[in-house]
Image (cartoon, rainbow, N blue to C red):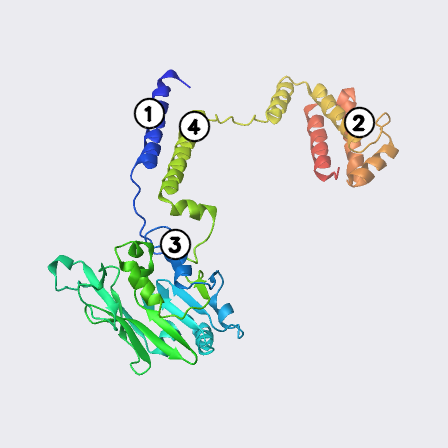
Amino acid sequence: MRRDEWKYVALLAGLIFAVVALELFGPKPVDWTESYVRDDARPYGARILYELLPALFPEVPVTPVERPPYLVFRDSTRVGTNYLFLTSVFAPDPAETESLLAFVERGNGVFVAAHEVKGPFADTLRLETTRRFGAILPADPGERDTVAVGFTASTLSDAAYRYRAGVARAYFSRFDTLRAVVLGEDSAGEVNFLRFDRGRGAVLVHALPLVFTNASLLDGENAEYAFAALSHLPVRPVLWDGYLKPGRTEARTPLRFVLRDPSLRQAYYLALVTVLLFIFFHARRRQRVIPVIPPLENTTLEFVETVGRLYLDHGDHANLADKRITYFLDYVRRRLRLPTNRLDEALIGQVSERSGVPLDEVRALFDAIAEARAPSKRSAETLLRLSARLDAFYEQSQR
């Protein structure tokens, strides 16, 4: 590496060190992703609720379930159990809805807290969920950004539980008033908590799942509201749903884990950019132009033609004829595998047989050779006849 390149390396190393230090010691942004996962300590995780459930349901087990609820619902021997669902959208398919209601009718309880309740389950209960996007104006201007929620057994007053408007925006805009029991509402009079009695069990549906998350449970006395809502379930074994959660269909790969964490994601992208820059500049330094080397020309034919013209111009017909005869006899020895010490009738027949040239033409060729070797016949015409016979033989020969 040249001396003047060290300053660029030092500059790049300093930038990397500054970014890493900023990520390590700088303030971390709050992740407000709604996960509702039992071991998630983020604001909208459910770690606090899951850890406090044994206090709400003493002396009974609280069991997490990481498999599809349908597999639990179809177990006809399970009776006297509470199944707790905490998610953003609750929309079981027809088979799951049928098995869920049969599970309830056998004497079990199902508690569903979700912003949206859709699909066959909502159609069966004649339930419609609406999310409010406008502001709710409270009586007290100082509480403009909050919504008061409570239970129908009590009066919504200043002592009601107050949540940020973004937490308490959903409500049930339609439900079967003949079968549903209203358990809770907000300060605008919108219903957000219902119970449906079916068979020997009940389905409780709550429209505000965020009131059960970590951030809400740590907000003043609001934890009392969440546990009061859950207290509508009888004290018996609890199944915690860990399957129907937001983002459950995401690929659980090491790269997904890296990309979900802001610090790891930035470090990953920084490493990719650094590697690409290294490859780019290193390739430019190492790359050299490969010269185009033309292939060597085959000058054999030009050489032969030049030598032939030299002999022809000097009138040395005998020497040129001897060279062509010598080349032909070498061809007979190498290609046809025949001895050439005697140019007799037997050799003529063997040459014709092995080369595939008619016997008459081979005999005429040998006659031309004999004529060209005669001292009195070495003329330009004799050389031309010999060349014509030789060229015709080479064209017809199969060897």
| Mark 3 crowdedness (10 Å alpha carbons): few <14, some 14-19, many ≥20 | some
SS assignment at label 1: helix
Amino acid type for the residue under numbered disc 3: Arg
Residue that numbered label 4 is attached to? 282
Residue that numbered label 3 is attached to? 47
Nearer the camera: disc 4 or disc 3:
3
Q: Which image quadrant for residue 152?
A: bottom left
Rendered residue at 25%/55% (across/down): 220
Residue found at the far front of this picture: 59
**Disc 3 to disc 2, how far (Cα)?**
113 Å
In this view, 4 is above or below 387: above
Residue found at the far bottom of this picture: 178
Residue 291 in percent (x, y) is at 48, 25
Q: Front-most of 160 and 110?
A: 160
Residue 332 in percent (x, y) is at 79, 30
Amino acid type for the residue under numbered disc 4: His
SS assignment at label 3: helix
Specify the label residue 370 is tagged with: 2
Residue that numbered label 1 is attached to? 11
Nearer the camera: disc 1 or disc 4:
1
Residue 361 in percent (x, y) is at 77, 38
Q: Are marks 1 and 4 in contact (CB under 8 Å)?
A: no
Q: Earlier in the sequence, mark 1 or mark 3?
A: 1
SS assignment at label 2: helix
Residue 57 in percent (x, y) is at 41, 64
Report whether 388 appears left or right of 9. right
Specify the label residue 341 is tagged with: none
Nearer the camera: disc 1 or disc 3:
3
Q: Earlier in the sequence, mark 4 or mark 3?
A: 3
Q: Are marks 4 and 3 in contact (CB under 8 Å)?
A: no
In this view, 299 is above or below 161: above
